[in-house]
Amino acid sequence: MRTHAQPTRKRDPTTLLVILAVAALVFLAVHTVTKGAPVLNGGGDAPAAIVSETGCATTTGGATRPPPPTRLYPPPAPNRVPVDHHSGVPASSGPPAAPPSPPPPAAAAPPAAGAPPGSAAPSIEGADVYRRALSLRDAHLAASANSSTSHPAGIPGMVHSIWLGGSPPATAFTCHAQWSSLNDGTLPTLMWRDADADALVREHFPHLASLYAALPKPVMRADWLRLMILAVVGGVYADIDACPLKPVRAWPAGTVPGGANATAGLVVGVETDTTRADWADWYSRQFQLCSWTVAAAPGHPAVAAMLHATARKVRATFREGGGRWPADITKRIVELTGPAVVTDEVLRYAGTFGDTRFETMHMMNEPRWFDDVAILPITAFSPGIGHMGAREIGDPEALVQHLFYGTWKGN
């Protein structure tokens, strides 16, 4: 019997589509279950190795990847306490009244006892300031390379002041000279002017240069420049109306700029510490830190955070105005570039190492340490204001007096 071959059966196109769809689903299910690490693409955008969060070496496609390198600073951690300007502390009793007026400017302090005539470190002004500051920073870093301080660098021994736009008045040099005379010629003082400020911004912050130049008020540029100086070279920043009452060697243990045993990477002082129910009518923060005197090591993370925060706020304000600065920009300076930024970012950083709630910080009467951040009591940088627990300028703990010239309000 002859056997006839069966003719080939044509498959229905719908059946083929169903088979392909089922195969695709099976492939996706198997891939999802078995994948162990992200697959690197060929476009060059992905890192060469992806490290697991545990820090252990992981593998991709059979290749072992090394653990991450040692970090210079610990990774950011969530705040133990959120930055909150409304405390649960009861308000002080009595009808609302304006805070006391700032005290009148004090007479210039005499040179340090025992300082030989002409021994003060020269005040440097003009085109040499930027390069001189870099040189002083590098010398400090070289000398502290084997230091046992908790911060990698420590605070260099130099003082910065700023005057931008036009010729400074004679009063701009009163406090500046005292920083030199009170420190026996060991603390160089540098007065930053426009040319050196522009060089610093151009060399180290080119991404902010156009925004810096567009800031509508000289005081806003000075606020930014303060943070940029501390970020790049470190040292002590002092407003032109922030006069020293004592040499820096009298600062609390561990906070002396340039000191051999200094452990601080950032030193700030309390400006405002009030339980007034109407505090928001007079101050930007219920517990506020000074911006007229700040000391920092070069590259300190908290200073970088301040600079990032103020840039973000300023950009947002400019965009909200459709490319125009608001008419009330002067009223916003404290919040955009001033002590509000310093306060929020210092407390945010310090809050990763301890409790910075108002209830904890209120009426503090000794330095509080948060890792390498030292927050000094109100008498240190705000003596003689007549309220909030601040003692007089002759107190042993009074270090800097703010004379409240208020020149920024006229700029």
Image (cartoon, helix red, strand yellow):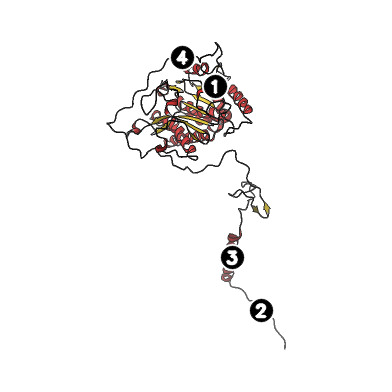
The residue under label 3 is: 26
Tag in front: 4 or 3: 4
Calculate the distance from the C-alpha at mark 1 to the C-alpha at mark 4: 20 Å
Measured as percent of width and height from the top left, residue 64 is found at 67, 51
The front one of 344 and 33 is 344
Look at the image and tell me in which quarter the N terminus lies: bottom right
Residue 167 at least partly seen: no
* Mark nearer the N terminus (2 vs 3): 2
In the rendering, which numbered label is found on residue 293?
Answer: none
* Mark nearer the N terminus (4 vs 2): 2
Residue ranking furthest to the top: 117
Compared across the picture, whether 91 is left or right of 199 comes to left
Identify residue type, mark 1: Ala
Identify residue type, mark 3: Val
Tag in front: 2 or 1: 1
The residue under label 4 is: 170
* Mark nearer the N terminus (4 vs 3): 3
Calculate the distance from the C-alpha at mark 4 to the C-alpha at mark 3: 82 Å
Pointers 3 and 1 in contact (CB under 8 A)? no
The front one of 387 and 290 is 387
